[in-house]
Image: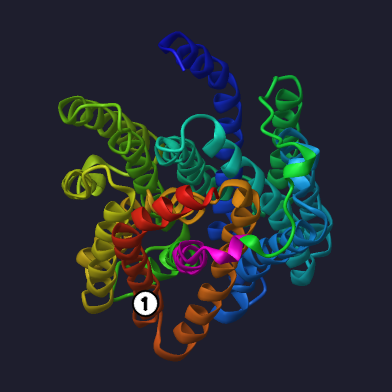
Amino acid sequence: MTNKEVKTQSRSYTIPLITITLLFFMWGFITCMNDILIPYLKQLFKLTFFESMLVQFCFFGAYFIGSLIYFLISISKGDPINKAGYKKGIMFGIFLAAFGCVLFYPAATFSYYPLFLGALFILGLGFTVLQITANAYVSLLGSEESASSRLNMTQAFNAFGTTIAPVLGGHLIFEFFSAPDGSFSAVATRIPYLIFAGILLLVALLISRVKLPSFQTQEEEIVKGWGALQFSHLKFGVFAMFCYVGGEVAVGSFIISFLEQPQIMGFNEIISKNYLSLYWGGAMIGRFLGAISLNQSLSQGKKAIYMLGAAAAVFLVIFSIVDLSFAQTSFFLVFIVLNFIAFFIGKAAPARTLSIFAAVNVVLLISAMVNHGELAMYSILGIGIFNSIMFSNIYTLAISGLGKYTSQGSSLVVMAILGGAIVPIFQGYLADQVGVQHSFIIPVFCYLVILIFGAYCSKYLGHVESAEAKSGH
């Protein structure tokens, strides 16, 4: 392919990538609203930690059910997305998610917890379709070598949504739409989720009018059976994704309750939601840095300059969003520096960088468990910035070299988002038994698995890809 052809192809992918990035932002925002719903519904319905974590169980459990259905269809009748096309798959996912948001209206009207859980399940099914289609679609919008960089960029805007959600969503539910006397009422969730449904439908309208490149293969190339499971790195990647989503969701779900603990900070929900934004804001910083660091076409010097500029710009955005002073957010600068160091030690290798980041999170979690006050708080909030590249790196490493099994493999990796349903439930049960602070031992084991997966891919994936090339996969 000539330079001119490469540039033309790059330009043709720009508008689709921007459009899909907008979608990533919106579903990140709505997903993070669960972290606001958990403490809100816990107080409203007088729930235990275990019962309140059913929010995540139903939402992320839908990922497993939806992905399992998709996988079973793909092995018996061929890949549905390959037949229907990525655009139709994305549109279907948006409409399903919007319907889930609309169901919050009757749930809030009747103030019935199981109805909330049902709405979250439907919402999760919609996002399952988006995860299967949109992530794989982004990985196809360019070369396989730069797939991690592109996914980190789109995931950065997903994280931008998760950063805004605790502040804006928390304000809407805890303050703006709350009862006049300040008491907890399910009605406070009605209007916000109708607004989210409306925005999703507007995004669907935009996508319907944008020409998206088609990556459908020919009918004779559609594969059936369990072919994707022949790849050992995919199977390990599915387990690593289970642990990553489980660890990230569990930590985010417990941050407000963690900061409420008297031995930590003793904050209320209105203050804690701003610190929750820092946790997700860290993921946004790290994903922008990851998109630059993992870009193989940039020199080390340019990477350093661009990463410094991106970190400064994104930090200022976060600082302008959260209702905290510079003194209260300045500790984050230390984590940004540590993130820089970790990226340069990783040397733009997705597997090596993944292991380094997982190791840092293990240390931070142990610190949060054994310390009190600000040190414990900073440790738990710093996990976000080192979560940053994990989804995109695990995803691209897991589906690397799958060829015609890529969509099938993608559905298996998305199925592993079940971790977001299972791990918080276990941590919720443990928190009821031994307290919130010590319950973080559960995510420690999750990040240890990710560390090992990164090391495995560093050592073996190159050999796997060579074997696949020789065998024609």
Residue 55: give x, y in percent of width and height: 64, 67
Tell me the residue at 45%/53% (across/down). Answer: 391
Residue 276: give x, y in percent of width and height: 41, 54
Question: 455 or 186: nearer the eye?
Answer: 455
Residue 25: give x, y in percent of width and height: 55, 37
Which amino acid type corresponds to the residue marked 1 in the rendered image? Phe
Q: Main secondary structure of the magenta part?
A: helix
Circle 1 sits in a helix, a strand or a loop, which is it? Answer: helix
* Residue at the extreme front: 470
**Disc 1: which residue:** 445
Residue 127: give x, y in percent of width and height: 67, 50
Tell me the residue at 59%/70% (across/down). Answer: 421
Question: 379 above or below 388?
Answer: below
Question: 238 or 460: nearer the eye?
Answer: 460
The magenta stretch spans residue 229: yes
Magenta part of the chain: 228-244
Tell me the residue at 40%/78% (across/down). Answer: 442
Tell me the residue at 64%/52% (across/down). Answer: 178
